[in-house]
Image: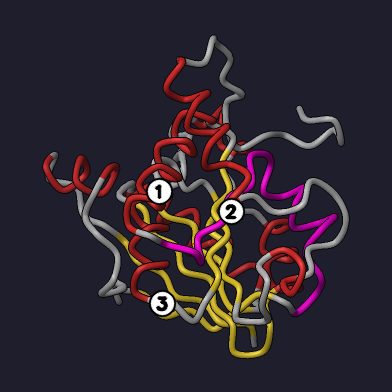
Amino acid sequence: MDGHGRVRSYNARRGRLSALTLERMEVFGPRHSIPASGMLLPSEAFGRTAPVVLEIGCGHGAAALAYASAHPAHDLLAVDVFTPALARMLAEADRRGLTNLWMHRGDAVTLLAERVAPASLAGVHVFFPDPWPKSKHARRRFISAETLDLIASRLAPGGELLLATDHDGYAAHVRSAFAAHGGFVVTEGERPSWRPTDGFEAKGLAAGRRVSEFRAEVR
């Protein structure tokens, strides 16, 4: 449970941070972080008014980095709770000279609910979320009626939710959740051309698993 009594869709990781992670966060964090509190105002947070895309659970940032590189006119806000992964992503963003990739360390649902204005996002990306395959853990899956309501309310007209998973059980869960929600027009099977096959996707493909792709627009 989090501080709001909500079941987390992730494990809160603890442990000592390496010297490299601390150095990366100290050097690159201030350049790519959003304000620590208050509503997210693009003109203040990003220094311009442009389409904003939120990636939930960015991990080491392969997809976030690729999107920011391919869409310089957009601002990509990558959210995760794992500091070493964010630090690695920021170091690579600096190496590539990306100025439109931003990060927030914390819970994405809290960020969406409390700091993102309604109808303000051009897109939300959820790539290879933890499938929580055991039935007793299914309630921890990120996609739910509540999160779909929240995402739908935060997407601007024409905005879209992109989701990918290499777990057939999670894909079935997503289909059921979309059908029960009814607020999205869902297209299945179209893979974004800009997304690399790194990380979880590469592992899934190497293991012979198929990747299910979902593109959902608010009705």
Q: Which residue is mark 1?
A: 61
Rendered view: 42 above or below 208: below
Q: Which residue is mark 3?
A: 71
Rendered view: 130 above or below 137: below
Q: Quadrant of the N terminus?
A: top right
Measured Cα–Cα span from mark 1 to mark 2:
20 Å
Q: Quadrant of the C terminus?
A: bottom right
Q: Which quadrant would residue 210 be assigned to in this image?
A: bottom left
- What numbered label is drawn on residue 143? 2
Report if residue 168 lies within the magenta region. no
Q: Earlier in the sequence, mark 2 or mark 3?
A: 3
Label 3 packing within 10 angstroms: few (<14), some (14-19), many (20+)? some
Q: Which residues are magenta?
A: 98-119
Describe residue 159's horizontal placement relative to residue 60 as left or right.
right
- Nearer to us of marks 1 and 2 is 1
Measured Cα–Cα span from mark 2 to mark 3:
26 Å
Picture residue at 77% right of the left edge, 52% below the top: 35
